[in-house]
Image (cartoon, rainbow, N blue to C red):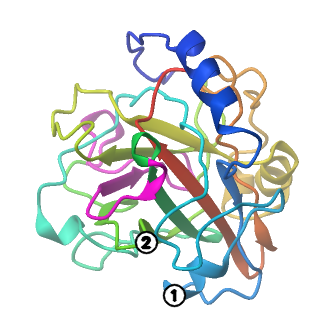
Amino acid sequence: MKADLSQTLLSRRSALGLISGALGSMTLPACGGGSSSDDSSSSSSSSSSSSSSGSSSSSSGSTSASCTLTPEGEIGPYFTDDSATAYNRSDIRSNLDGSSTQSGIPLTLHIYVYDFDNNCAALEGAQVDIWHCNAEGVYSNESVESTLGQSWLRGYQLTDATGAVTFKTIVPGWYQGRTTHIHLRVRSSYSEASSTSDGTNTTQLFFPQATIDTIDTTIAPYSSEGKNSTTNANDHVYTPETEGKTELTLSGDSSNGYVATCVIGLPITAA
């Protein structure tokens, strides 16, 4: 059975409560859906995507009126060194050489990074890594998975002047003991470490339960694994660590692909 590694997290709950109260009610939601008409190859369209619960930002897109700190989710055991420049890419579906493109439902993920400690200004030049399993629940470049040397479904980008990056990937599958999720790590002035054992400034993104239940039981290749017995509600990261605040809102459908927008408020911190 696979399980993410536990990290020792310092709770800042009481301090964050005071800060959040001072900000008032106008906040950017953590994760939301994009427009169903988004062109997944166009990063410029991401600036117009918004959550259904609403957001407030400047017309330039470089500064948010207010934001919330993103809750930390453990890094897990499957982070890998991505120092090779080829990992700096928007489309992570294949190996770095273009081989072994992973099959699955297309997912376009727009990510915006804001600096909570600097009036929620857009953070330019931050390195955003994402990695996740394929539709069969397997990670690349892991000896325990017999995938050493493979590099699919891993990559990073540097945020632009609006704090944005866009990744083209697939909806992940699942493996025993975990609900469907994507790992995300931001390397910035808050945490620049490249060590695989450094779990700071990391979180995990999740999917609506009804959506993944349908995908896992009706859509190939996911349906070959069947329905996951671990739900969001009983996953050890979804509720205890991120409190469900990093669940994505999806637009689109399983035939044409999904789009989602996620706002990251730095520093990522224990809830």
10 Å crowding of disc 2: few (<14), some (14-19), many (20+): many
Identity of the residue drawn at 77% across and 79% down? 255
Identity of the residue drawn at 39% across and 69% down? 92
Location of residue 201 (image quadrant):
top left
Question: Magenta stretch mostly in which secondary structure?
Answer: loop
In the image, which is nearer the foreground, mark 1 or mark 2? 2
Q: Amino acid at mark 1?
A: Ser
First to last magenta residue range: 119-147
Between 22 and 52, the residue placed more toward the observer is 22
Q: Is residue 126 magenta?
A: yes
SS category of the residue bearing label 2:
loop
From the viewer's perspective, is 257 left or right of 66?
A: right
Percent position of residue 67, x then y: 59, 47
Identity of the residue drawn at 77% across and 50% down? 212
Between 129 and 257, the residue placed more toward the observer is 129
Q: Amino acid at mark 2?
A: Thr
Between 86 and 119, the residue placed more toward the observer is 119
Location of residue 162 (image quadrant):
bottom left
Percent position of residue 132, x then y: 46, 49
10 Å crowding of disc 1: few (<14), some (14-19), many (20+): some
Residue under label 2: 162
| Label annotation for residue 189 | none
Residue under label 1: 44
Q: Is residue 94 magenta?
A: no
